[in-house]
Image (cartoon, grey):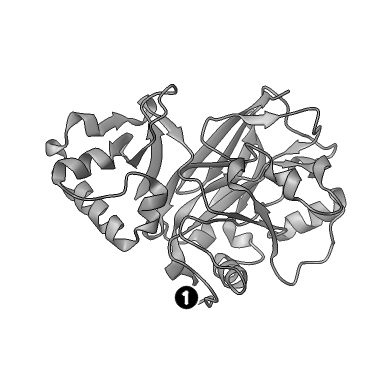
Amino acid sequence: MRLLTFTHSPDDTTERLGVETDGLVLDLAVLADRAGVRLPHDLLSFVQAGPAALEAARSLLAADPAGRPAEAVHRLDAVTLCAPLRPGKIIGVGLNYIEHVEESSRSLDTDKDLPPRPVLFGKPATAVTGPGAPILHNADLTTQLDWECELAVVIGRTAFRVSEEEAYEHVFGFSIVNDISARDQRRSGQWFFSKGQDSYAPFGPVVVTRDAIRDPMALDLSLRVNGITKQKSNTRHMLFPIARLIADISSGMTLEPGDVIATGSPSGVGAGMVPPEFLRPGDTVEATVEGIGTLSNPVVDAR
């Protein structure tokens, strides 16, 4: 199931929970109301409601399409997509692709040795922005605004001290995060301000439920700037796979439904280019993950 959050137009502030199917967006709230079914009207609440909400949604979608009310069906290109949800917390993973470890040691002064455990950092929920929304470039704060295409894991069940074998039982689904970074705002080695500013976590365009992704550790991912490919890899090249990340993080931190793990970036970031390349106002960044889609965002001047 491909779940999303949308509004009817760019000027509409009422966000609605939908399902994408065959180029259409189905409004789950309308379908549920017509069927007399109780269903959360936003994706975070839907995730928190657990398997019962998923089963109710599947039943609604299995009904005869001819019986769907017109107001429940929209063309995908006629709605405005929003960030799927606002996570309670976003946990970023650094240096999780071997080639990116080498690239970072050369360009970002990080350790050249492979990390023995996942390298973790946080991004605040206020950094989240949706598909098509602007990435804010403030030249008073950075001249080194960089990109990182990452597979996002959306947690579906509370996880604390779970094993690798149990890890996927706690996953709701998958999406895309573009881990935007102001490379020149790392402070005494700390990345929080560099990676946590407003708009530095483009997220979306959809959340694909776990059952719809056959193998999340075998997905192609890529990133383009103004149509030119900068990153191209596959999740099989992660140093620490998803199950290991969940087990490691939950060893001392509770993961809650709706939390997001950004699983790390492959090589090809701007700082690693020769010479380095960074985002500028007017650029368009497109992050793509197989089976999920493309997350596109313009870069705008925020001064």
On the question of residue 268 being in view, the answer is no
Which residue is at a point 52% across and 56% down the rendered structure image? 259
Q: Is residue 103 left or right of residue 299?
A: right
Which quarter shows the C terminus?
top right
Tell me how many marks there are.
1
Tell me the quarter of the picture where residue 301 sits: top right
- Residue type at mark 1: give it: Glu
Q: Taking 8 as reference, is 112 above or below it? A: below
Quick one: SS at disc 1? loop
* Mark 1 surroundings within 10 Å by alpha-carbon count, few (fewer than 14), some (14 through 19), many (20 or more): some
Give the side of residue 254 with respect to residue 137, left or right.
left
Q: Residue at x 76, y 34 (%)?
A: 278
Q: Which residue is mark 1?
A: 166
Residue 9 percent across, percent down from the top left:
39, 23
Above or below residue 209? Residue 130 is above
Question: Residue at the spot x=31%, y=34% of the render?
Answer: 24
